[in-house]
């Protein structure tokens, strides 16, 4: 029994670390977005912060798609959890939609020229993005809760 517990911990303990790092990225992304929203009207001097936010945004959604969701899918398959696989198939298209909107935001503000020509629209774009990302965070939290936490309990 101890060996089984060790195996599960070795196997899925790394997923905890991945999720923890990713949730830290989320916190930093939210803080950066709040900073920009609280600034109200941005000026060209804010361009580096806007570009940094765009990078954080793309990094966050990329880690979700190419690391976290992949690990959760592997867990679901390894635990032969049909309901978890079904949940993934249901939520991933919703998450994909939010990814598309995040990428559109990125493409709109990712360079100095893009930022400077669209600074007036930034507060509205940030507000719209925050709504989309809040929706995404709910989906992701549901995936973590219903897939990873359930499997962590089973593995223990």
Image (cartoon, rainbow, N blue to C red):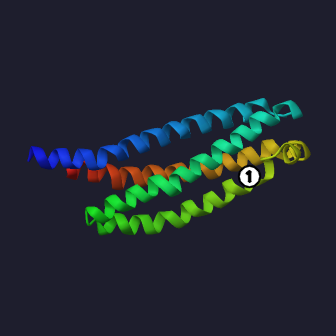
Count of all numbered marks drawn on residues in the image: 1
Percent position (x, y) of residue 128? 71, 50
72 relative to 35, above or below: below
* Residue 156 appears in the figure: no
Residue at the image point whose x is 30% and y is 48% from the top: 12
Residue sitting farthest toward the right: 117
Percent position (x, y) of residue 125? 77, 48
Residue sitting nearer the eye, 54 or 96? 54
Crowding near pointer 1: few (<14 within 10 Å), some, many (20+)?
A: some
Report which quarter residue 72 is drawn in.
bottom left
Q: Is residue 46 left or right of residue 93?
A: right
Percent position (x, y) of residue 8? 22, 49
Q: Mark 1 = which residue? A: 105
Residue at the image point whose x is 39% and y is 56% from the top: 71
Q: Is residue 23 left or right of residue 30?
A: left
Residue at the image point whose x is 80% and y is 33% from the top: 40
Percent position (x, y) of residue 113? 88, 46
51 relative to 79, above or below: above
19 relative to 85, above or below: above
């Amino acid at each position: 029994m101890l060996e089984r517990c060790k195996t599960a911990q070795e196997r899925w303990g790394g997923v905890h670390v991945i999720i923890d790092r990713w949730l830290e990225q989320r916190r930093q992304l939210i803080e950066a977005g709040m900073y920009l929203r609280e600034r109200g009207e941005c000026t060209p001097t804010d361009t580096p912060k806007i570009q940094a936010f765009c990078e954080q945004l793309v990094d966050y959604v990329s880690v979700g798609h190419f690391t976290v969701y992949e690990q959760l899918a592997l867990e679901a398959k390894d635990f032969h959890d049909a309901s978890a696989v079904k949940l993934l198939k249901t939520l991933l298209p919703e998450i994909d939609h939010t990814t598309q909107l995040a990428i559109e935001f990125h493409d709109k503000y990712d360079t100095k020229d893009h930022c400077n020509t669209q600074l007036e629209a930034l507060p509205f774009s940030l507000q719209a993005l925050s709504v989309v990302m809040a929706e995404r965070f709910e989906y992701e939290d549901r995936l973590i809760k219903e897939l990873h936490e359930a499997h962590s309990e089973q593995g223990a």
